[in-house]
Amino acid sequence: MTKPQHHAIVVIGAGICGATIANELLQRGQSVCIVDAASSAATACSSHAYAIAHPHIGRGSPRLLRLTRIAFLLAETRWGKAWNKHGIFQPTKKDKHFDRVEVTNYLKSLDLDQDIAVALDAQEAEKICGIKQSGVWLSRGASLNIFEASNALLQEHEDLTCLWNTRVAKLEQLNGQWFLLNQANEAILSADKVVVATAMDSKPLMSSIGIRLPLKPVRGQLSIFSIRKEDAWTQKLPRVGISGDGYCLPAQQLEDGSYRWMVGSSFDEGKDDLGSRDSSDAFNREQAKGLLDYSEGDSRSLIKAGDFVGVRCVAGDRLPIIGALNQRPGIFLATALGSRGVLWSALAAKLITAQVLGDDFALLARLGFAADLVSALAPTRFFAGALAAPAALASNSKAVLPSAPKAK
């Protein structure tokens, strides 16, 4: 049998996370082989053109809030040139009274300076954002074409090998090396270190080496609506992104005066079908009314012009799984990114690269990675029984599905 090609570092998965990790390793002078079952990069959830990105400021564990701040700053730096900084407004919950002092103090507690997040009353928000609701204005909130970003990260490089149309079915360790096997149990590659940066495919891969990951899919459908120029909705459409119960992008006026508006996303835990659903569009129409506080709006005026369906991979504690798999030396995981792929990919690139290269922890500390945050992301957290019960397998987040407009 022909001896498989050997690489020091192999990254499995060429979505935004795998591509970012591979690129970070290349920047650190490493040779990398990236493997994907598709014929090119970013063919699944990473094919989205409008993934939104902002620090999380809502409910969640303190570590989640701290991590999204770090991840946002890393993402902003990494994708600065491709960053579509239109700003994102997060309205106050309908059942909650707006208290500027309380909100401002809360933002300070998250280490969010006013150049990142500021509390606005309804009049201020209408002037700045065109939305007459109180809330938080995230002026540096942005969207990113992650399909383009992923492909740009994997441009031809003398130290980069891309292996397409290659599905890795299992992993096997022999004589200190890791072998990547196909479904016929044939060795495709061998490697000293393997980074698994796939979504749900990471579950069977880890199972092949005796590791159970508590992952589940969440289907989301983004709706692309067309609105006639004479419709009452045009007076309500936002000029910034909005993130709340669902999300929307700024409305885009077309040459004929009509508008194109993307709203998302539906949320179906445990579902992984990619078929379009009328019920998901209906759900998004109701979310659109809620986002704009426009309960009297006629949902029939939101005419479907297209959609995009994606399946997120989520873990049980709202956090991604990023880090070295200590139980299997040489294996590193970056999965369960949920609805925050842009943020977690930038963070994973720094953390995984540091661990692969054995960097001193002081380097990570300068980026804001306290030891408890690294532990909060580590795969090891699932092997202490904390998430053993099936009921614990909740979603990563009931948030947005950043997605590309693909008209039917």
Image: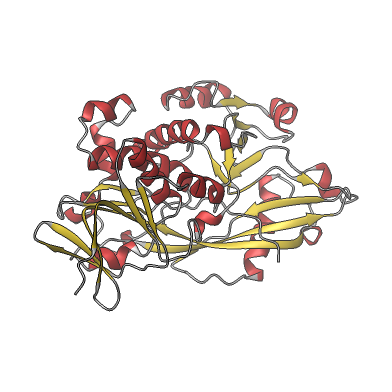
Left or right, 246 with respect to 293, comes to left
Across and down, in percent, residue 187 comes to 23, 69
Furthest residue in direction left, as rendered: 175
Above or below — where is 142 with respect to 401?
above
Horizontal side, residue 379 vs residue 92: left or right: left
Residue 315 in sight here:
no
> Residue at point 52% right, 45% down?
149
Q: Quadrant of the N terminus?
A: bottom left
Of residues 79 and 224, the one drawn nearer to the viewer in this rendering: 79
Q: Residue at x 70, y 44 (%)?
A: 292
Q: In the depicted view, which residue is nearer to us: 87 or 84?
A: 84
Say if 206 sits above or below 287 in the image: below
Screen quadrant of the C terminus: bottom right
**Is residue 175 at all visible to an observer of this figure?**
yes
Image position, residue 39 (x, y; %)? 48, 64
Colour scheme in use: secondary structure
Q: Residue at position x 51%, y 45% from top?
A: 152
Within the image, what quadrant is residue 346 found in? top left
Is 251 left, or right, of 326 in this rendering? right
Q: Is residue 296 left or right of residue 354?
A: right
Residue 7: where, in percent of width, then height?
25, 53
Residue depicted at 65% across the width and 62% down the height: 307
Image mark count: 0
Pinpoint residue 229: horizontal percent, then vertical percent: 88, 49
Quadrant of the image occupied by residue 125: top right
Residue furthest right in the image: 230
